[in-house]
Amino acid sequence: MSEPSIEHGPETPVERRIAGNSDTRVIKKYPNRRLYDTVESRYITLADIRRLVTEKIEFVVIDKKSEEDITRSILLQVISEQEHAGEPMMSQDFLSQVIRSYGGAMQSFVGNYLEQSLKMFQPPREPANGSAADPFTAMANIARQNYERWLTMQGEFLRAVTSGATGATRPRGPMEAGTPENASAANESVVEGAKR
């Protein structure tokens, strides 16, 4: 099996864009559907891509023929492979709901909500001094961050709903402050707007 010749210097628009960031690894997808890691100078598999993700190594996948960034497509393939192997994480109902959210007014909200929800499950970082954090303090901090994220997402949801229900471009007032009391007032505002 012959390896592709190693080119010097950025050759695609995507490669030129990331040339200044030496931490980003370039993976090339060739017409034969094989992935080539330019750092390790070898062909890799989707399992190797998964390893890069879990090790938090920044990378971009470029289609060699079209010179397009196809990283998202490859990541979706990794997810699909993981869903087929072993016990799936996403139910059929969940996947159907995600598909239904495409193209609607709530598409960006659903994407942001899912992203923020997954961030809640990331393990907390250790403090800068290297000592392990008190587990109760860590849980309290996670709960506070989750509550703040929930308030932000609720505000985005309510803005989307009220702008669609009342024709307003962006509601002003109660939900802007992000407090529980104001979120309750914003809920009442949405109900009133829907009645009109």
Image (cartoon, grey):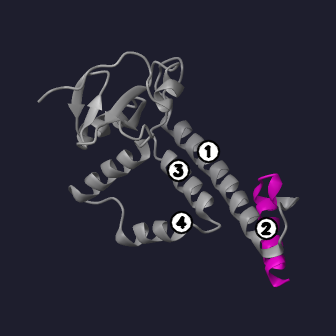
The residue under label 4 is which amino acid type?
Tyr
Q: Secondary structure at mark 3?
A: helix
3 or 1: mark nearer the eye: 3
Quick check: 154 left or right of 133?
right
- Residue at mark 3 to residue at mark 4: CA–CA distance: 15 Å
Can you tell which of label 1 and label 2 is closer to the viewer? 2
In the image, what residue occupies the spot 34% across and 19% down?
A: 7
Alpha carbon of mark 2 to alpha carbon of mark 4: how far? 19 Å
Badge 1 amino acid: Gln
Q: Decide: few, some or many residues near mark 1? Use Cα within 10 Å; few <14, some 14-19, many ≥20.
A: few
Q: Which residue carries the number 1 mark? A: 145
Q: Are marks 3 and 4 in contact (CB under 8 Å)?
A: no
Give how far apart the Cα atoms at labels 3 and 1 are: 14 Å
Q: Which residue is mark 3?
A: 115
Which of pointers 1 and 2 lies earlier in the amino acid sequence?
1
- Report the Cα–Cα distance between label 1 and label 4: 28 Å
Q: Nearer the viewer, residue 6 or 74?
A: 6
Q: Which residue is mark 4?
A: 102
Residue 144 in percent (x, y) is at 63, 46
**Residue 163: assigned label:** 2
Q: Nearer the viewer, residue 177 or 69?
A: 69
User: Farthest residue toward the front?
Assistant: 65
- Check residue 83 for magenta coloring: no
Measuring 35% from the left and 36% from the top, which residue is drawn there?
Answer: 64
Q: Amino acid at mark 3?
A: Glu
Residues in magenta, as a range: 175-196
Q: Are marks 1 and 4 in contact (CB under 8 Å)?
A: no
